[in-house]
Amino acid sequence: MFSQSSRAMDYFTKLFKYQKAGVREYWIVDPAKEVVTVYNFEKETMEQYSFDEDAPVGIYEDF
């Protein structure tokens, strides 16, 4: 299980730092919620996928 400080680090601190550093896409896999959150900084989008769904990689075509 993730601690609250780890969760805050992933959802806020890392998200901000990675976006500012030029990372194109950032994924957070949350096993507690069984959700994958994908931030595509190039397209300025955020999508969520359940563990039952395929999550496409936005920065590579057909991946």
Image (cartoon, grey):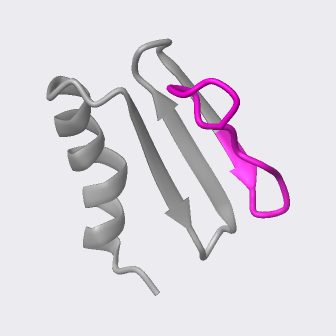
Q: 56 above or below 13?
A: above
Residue at image position (69%, 68%) is 34
Q: In this view, does 35 lie to the left or right of 18?
A: right
Magenta residue check for 24? no
- Give the image location of residue 12, x and y in percent: 29, 45
Q: 19 above or below 43?
A: below
Which secondary structure is most common in the magenta stretch? loop
Residue at image position (54%, 40%) is 38
Determine which quarter of the picture holds residue 22. Answer: top left
- Give the image location of residue 2, x and y in percent: 40, 80
Residue at image position (32%, 56%) is 10
- Give the image location of residue 60, x and y in percent: 55, 28
Q: Which residue lies furthest to the front in this view?
A: 62
Residue at image position (47%, 54%) is 28
Determine which quarter of the picture holds residue 56. Answer: top right
Q: Quadrant of the C terminus?
A: top right
Q: 1 above or below 8?
A: below
Q: Residue furthest bottom?
A: 1
Q: Residue furthest top?
A: 43
Q: In this view, does 22 lie to the left or right of 4?
A: left
Q: Give the range drawn in magenta.
A: 48-63
